[in-house]
Amino acid sequence: MWFFFFPQEIFPIEALRKCGELGFGAIYCKEDHGGTGLHRIDASVIFEALSQGCVSTTDYISIHNMCAWMIDEFGSDELRNKWIPKLATMECLASYCLTEPDYGSDAANISTTAVLKGDHYVLNGSKVFISGGGDTDVYVAMVRTGEPGPKGITCMLVEKGSPGLSFGQKERKVGWNSQPTRAVLFDDCKVPAENVVGNLGDGFKIAMRGLNGGRINIASCSLGAAQSSIEICREYMKVRKQFGKSLENFQYLQFKLAEMATGLVVSRNMVRTAAKSLDENWPEKVMLCSMAKLFATDQCSKVSGCISTNEIMRLLISRDLFTDDRKLM
């Protein structure tokens, strides 16, 4: 799938809707409003499998699922009735809006404001690096309705077509080009008061709880990329020959493949454990989700790249040591 959507920068909406038909649009949302009703560990397995076809597209699906879960977990019955059935089938697509030009990791200090005027809020500010921005139907946005800091942040749904909502130009990216990325701009953007998700001031808590699952999701996507890379590498080593024998017979490359497989298996165990911790609400779930994302994405990046820049440098140094008679200083 990646070789078609990725280089042509196609946002594969029809393929996404087929995923929705399979129940992949609201995997861990409750069934009473159309969710699939599975667990985080199930979602991890699904995202790993899908990522073996296209990491970029699967990552967007994981973001969409995170948005659907936020609405299902914290939204009013009216919002759940309106959005979960359409998000579950992926008839409608969602984007997550937290990062701002001046606030990335410092999410507690976001500056996009929402001021209540009658029966609606007026939003001003911007969000950046939004996956699906401009092409999706609803934006789960964290905005400031109150005091500075995390307690002044509220979660709202901004529907595409809302007055005052616009988008920046499509970002040019090195990778992940099957999902568009744009800035989302609010210029006196009107949002109905009933589109508040949860209570006023709950936005930061909602965002952080959503990102716990998001860390597992992106780590699971990394697992899929690494699994696919190992399989491709193994098959290549069987058919590629050098010095009269196939690469699979070179001990150094056997060791490299063994290291890659070990890193993948350990990463998978960490990710599944973190998913289980969320499902069962372990006290250490936040730490485990963060550890899994940190370790798995790092290890799987090494696997997907086969050998890292540092390892290439080691090979070059060793080559010179064997060919250069100069003494080491």
Image: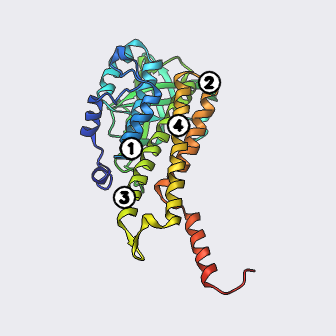
Q: Earlier in the sequence, mark 1 or mark 2?
A: 1
Q: Residue 151, which numbered label?
A: 2
Is residue 132 something that shows in the picture?
no
Above or below residue 176? Residue 146 is above
Q: Earlier in the sequence, mark 4 or mark 3?
A: 3
Q: Earlier in the sequence, mark 2 or mark 4?
A: 2
Mark 3 or mark 1, which is nearer to you?
3
Q: Which residue is mark 1?
A: 51
The three-letter amino acid code for the residue at tag 3 is Glu
Q: Residue at x 39, y 50 (%)?
A: 228
Q: Earlier in the sequence, mark 3 or mark 1?
A: 1
The three-letter amino acid code for the residue at tag 4 is Val
Q: Which residue in the rendered view is the most extreme toward the right?
A: 329
Q: Which residue is mark 4?
A: 271
Q: Which residue in the rendered view is the most extreme toward the bottom?
A: 325
Left or right: 58 with respect to 270? left
Left or right: 181 with respect to 320? left
